[in-house]
Image: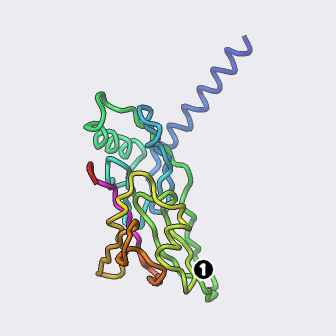
Amino acid sequence: MFKLIFGFFTALLLAAAAQAQSGYKIKTGDTLRVEVLEDDSLSRSTLVLPDGSITFPLAGGVAAAGRTVDQVRNDLTNALTPNFAAKPRVFVSVDALAEPAVQSAVVVPRAVRAVYVMGEITTPGMLEASRSTTLLQALAQAGGLTRFAADKRIQLRRGNKIYLYNYRTNGGSGISGSTVLVPGDVIVVPQRRLFE
């Protein structure tokens, strides 16, 4: 009898939590947990980027900010379906909320700079880089590349310019320790293509 009552209340609490998340509008800076039951290697946490999107293997960029968890789940399911024999079961939840913006604060100059790492990287998001942090150090600080990374097409976006880098190279055209990052730089590690 106790197990039956306990099971009922547990199901009720889980349903309430799911209902609360289903109406929540995702914001830039939130972290979403995406789980694909058919392929556990795809399951991961992903950051909602400043442009309001998330990147996910085999699905590419998906709009997330201003939408509900259910809407993002449906888009991911539709994008992943061509890669599976049957429609995949995708679950999306809000893993962490964006930190609220401080309304009034005293700005204290710091020696760190905000740079962003996105795409097929172990820990995408904002990095606090020092004045001398290089591109290679930022990739290492973000946990390195995932197995889906197109390591020959890494992009450094600085303003309106895009610089391409080859992570794995035997010659002198790869990532060296000489590319120092500046505030606002965005490092994009795209998903590799089928035979890349």
Decide: few, some or many residues near mark 1? Use Cα within 10 Å; few <14, some 14-19, many ≥20. few
Pick the quarter of the image with the N terminus.
top right
* Residue closer to the observer: 66 or 74: 74
Q: Is residue 38 left or right of residue 11?
A: left
Secondary structure of the residue carrying tag 1 is loop
Instruction: Give the quarter of the image for residue 61.
Output: bottom left
Residue 137, given in percent of the width and then of the height, sits at 53, 73
Q: Is residue 38 left or right of residue 20?
A: left
Seen from this angle, which residue lies furthest top?
Answer: 1
Magenta residues, start to end = 187-193
Name which residue lies at 44% across and 82% down: 179
Residue at the spot of label 1: 104
Q: Amino acid at mark 1?
A: Ser
The chosen color scheme is: rainbow
Residue 94, given in percent of the width and then of the height, sits at 51, 48
Name which residue lies at 35% across and 72% down: 165
* Residue closer to the observer: 14 or 90: 90
- In this rendering, the answer to whether 151 lies above or below 15 is below
**Residue 66 makes an appearance in the image:** no
Pick the quarter of the image with the C terminus.
bottom left
Q: Is residue 189 magenta?
A: yes
- In this rendering, the answer to whether 195 lies above or below 187 is above
* Residue closer to the observer: 171 or 98: 171
